[in-house]
């Protein structure tokens, strides 16, 4: 039964485990990111809905406050049972009711009334003492504070004529607008009748609203009051817009954009239902609007949204870092497993490489010792074979020593001027039996004028041995070896070429790594030769380049620095 080497089974299991671990952690990261995203989005959605609810409630509150206040005079004064037509005659007992209305409601500028049939001279005005009307005469009669009692012949005619139009219709209220002294006013009047059929007028009471004043003062002040109660402290911006969309009042508060609620209301200081079916021609229907806008920081909800986004970013960053760490860990695990596999192959290959020359040397020794070799020519051939195998064994041991740093090249180098031609010839002599036996044609082109190089002799011998061994080992059908040396830009370039099986382009960068053996390498070789050659050239300050075409051949080029003059004087070179 064939057993699988432990060194081969373990790396495969490690890579499989790393793969499953990576998949599991990636799935966990994805789930963490997804649930974190959903949690943050749900939190933001809930915050948004709560903001919208708060703005809607604030808009309802301001609209309700406006509606109740604008109908307050109608409900508490005009429709009140506390007055009758008798109170509209001197000494005008209705003055106390008017003073109370002035104190509670800021928008009525004047009250007016009469008793009996409506005549031009019968209208009596009850004005604010602190805010006289545009038509107020300087000789106003003083009345109960804060009310002044006046009669205005200049406006009575137009006012009486307009009220009588509604009197003809038998209505309970007369509402209209017109300008007095260039100021727009809204008039609201309740008519009292002596009979249920509304045929005989008993008197009437009304009030005036200066529309310019309410635009400048009434709405801004009321909006601020409502804002202080339940708006600006919660970060809401309360505003009132006119029919053209212009901002009339701003209750202050938030300035950032957020959820917005808007409610429309008519600019009428009485119950709009009174004119819902029959709108007077001289009563424009202006639809103003209450607007409430929330900031992104309302009640900390905006901060929650920002914190949610930050949390999501942190979670995503953490997941990304975790994924990156996992990728690097997985890569390291795979690299470690691959290295263990390469080392396992290396041990197996080196064991074979060591045993082969030893077995050959032992077999020759046994043959010679037993006396089975009688011919001198045969004995000479055996001797050459022993030398060849011993050199092969020596090269392998040198590679192992260089790899294990027993002979650390960075500490053991002894640089001196060396002749490249002599180094190449010495290396080729070691391969002479092998080249001759396999019928290799060697083209050597090292001109005599190639300068000396600054190098370590032992290291250069190990380098050339490994490169030439590779060229011989992986030669193709045409057994050819070419070695050429040239001088270029202050360096000596040595190129060793073959017409062998070649190296795939995706493996060229890998063959100079320890233990790596290409797909077409076949049996033999330790995976250290080119790695050690590359290291030696690098330690000498040169460059190691491989050019190869599969099925055509390979050229290994190395550059070495030219020896300086003082080096040549210190070390004779020829």
Image (cartoon, rainbow, N blue to C red):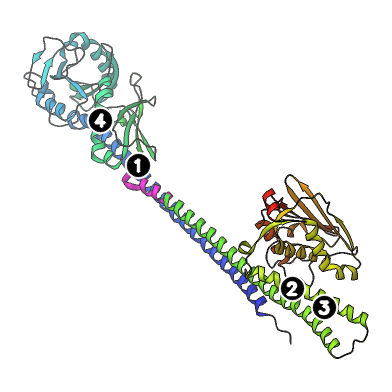
Q: To which residue does mark 3 refer?
A: 386
Residue 70, numbered label: 4
Task: Report if the CB atoms under discs 3 and 1 are less than 8 Å apart.
Answer: no
Examine the structure image and report whether residue 221 is included in the region drawn in magenta.
Answer: no
Q: Looking at this view, is 166 or 568 the one in front?
A: 568
Q: Residue at x 44, y 56 (%)?
A: 39
Whichever of callouts 3 and 4 sits on the residue coming sooner in the sequence is 4
Q: Nearer the viewer, mark 1 or mark 2?
A: 2
Q: To which residue does mark 1 refer?
A: 56
Real-space CA distance between mark 3 and mark 4, rounded to the nearest whole angstrom: 122 Å
Task: Report if the CB atoms under discs 3 and 2 are less than 8 Å apart.
Answer: no
Real-space CA distance between mark 2 and mark 4, rounded to the nearest whole angstrom: 112 Å
Task: Report if the CB atoms under discs 1 and 2 are less than 8 Å apart.
Answer: no
Q: To which residue does mark 2 refer?
A: 394
Q: In the rendered view, does 76 fall on the left or right side of 318?
A: left
State whether residue 322 is above or below residue 339.
Answer: above
Whichever of callouts 3 and 1 sits on the residue coming sooner in the sequence is 1
Task: Report if the CB atoms under discs 2 and 4 are less than 8 Å apart.
Answer: no
State whether residue 328 is above or below residue 74.
Answer: below
Q: Position of residue 57 (x, y in %)?
A: 32, 43
């Amino acid at each position: 039964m064939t057993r699988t080497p432990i060194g081969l089974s373990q790396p495969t299991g490690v890579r499989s485990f790393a793969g499953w671990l990576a998949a599991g952690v990636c799935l966990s990261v994805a789930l963490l990111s997804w649930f974190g995203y959903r949690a943050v989005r749900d939190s933001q959605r809930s915050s948004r809905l709560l903001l919208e609810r708060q703005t809607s409630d604030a808009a309802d509150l301001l609209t309700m406050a406006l509606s109740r206040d604008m109908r307050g005079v109608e409900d508490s004064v005009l429709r009140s049972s506390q007055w009758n037509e008798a109170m509209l005659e001197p000494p005008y007992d209705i003055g106390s009711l008017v003073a109370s209305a002035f104190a509670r409601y800021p928008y009525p500028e004047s009250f007016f009334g009469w008793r009996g049939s409506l005549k031009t001279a019968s209208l009596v005005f009850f004005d604010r003492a602190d805010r006289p009307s545009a038509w107020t005469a300087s000789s106003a009669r003083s009345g109960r504070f804060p009310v002044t009692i006046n009669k205005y012949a200049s406006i009575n005619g137009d006012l009486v004529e307009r009220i009588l139009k509604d009197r003809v219709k038998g209505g309970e209220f007369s509402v209209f607008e017109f300008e007095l002294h260039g100021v727009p006013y809204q008039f609201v009047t309740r008519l009292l009748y002596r009979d249920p059929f509304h045929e005989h007028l008993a008197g009437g009471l009304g009030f005036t609203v200066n529309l310019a004043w309410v635009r400048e003062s009434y709405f801004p002040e009321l909006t601020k009051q409502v804002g202080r109660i339940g708006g600006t402290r919660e970060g809401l911006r309360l505003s009132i817009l006119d029919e053209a969309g212009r901002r009339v009042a701003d209750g202050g508060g938030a300035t950032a954009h957020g959820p917005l609620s808007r409610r429309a209301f008519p600019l009428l200081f009485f119950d709009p239902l009174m004119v819902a079916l029959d709108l007077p021609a001289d009563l424009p229907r202006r639809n103003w609007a209450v607007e409430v806008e929330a900031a992104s920081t309302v009640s900390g909800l905006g901060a929650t949204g920002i914190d949610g986004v930050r949390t999501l970013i942190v979670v995503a960053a953490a997941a990304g870092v975790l994924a990156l760490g996992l990728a690097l860990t997985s890569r390291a695990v795979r690299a470690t497993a691959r290295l263990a596999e390469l080392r396992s192959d290396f041990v197996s290959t080196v064991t074979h490489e060591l045993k082969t020359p030893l077995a050959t040397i032992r077999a020759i020794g046994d043959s010679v010792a037993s006396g089975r070799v009688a011919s001198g020519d045969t004995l000479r051939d055996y001797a050459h074979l022993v030398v060849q195998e011993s050199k092969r064994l020596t090269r392998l041991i040198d590679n192992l020593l260089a790899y294990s740093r027993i002979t650390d090249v960075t500490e053991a180098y002894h640089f001196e001027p060396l002749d490249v031609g002599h180094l190449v010839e010495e290396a080729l002599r070691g391969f002479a039996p092998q080249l001759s036996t396999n019928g290799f044609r060697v083209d050597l082109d090292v001109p005599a004028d190639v300068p000396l190089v600054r190098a370590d002799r032992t290291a250069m011998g190990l380098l050339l041995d490994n490169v030439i061994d590779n060229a011989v080992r992986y030669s193709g059908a045409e057994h050819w070896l070419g070695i050429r040396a040239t001088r270029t830009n202050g360096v000596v370039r040595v190129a060793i070429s073959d017409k062998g099986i070649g190296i795939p382009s995706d493996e060229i960068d890998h063959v100079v790594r320890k233990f790596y053996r290409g797909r077409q390498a076949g049996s033999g070789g330790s995976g250290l030769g080119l790695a050690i050659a590359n290291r030696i050239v690098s330690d000498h300050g040169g460059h190691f380049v491989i050019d190869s075409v599969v099925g055509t051949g390979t050229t290994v080029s190395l550059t070495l620095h030219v020896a300086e003059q003082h080096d040549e004087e210190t070390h004779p070179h020829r």
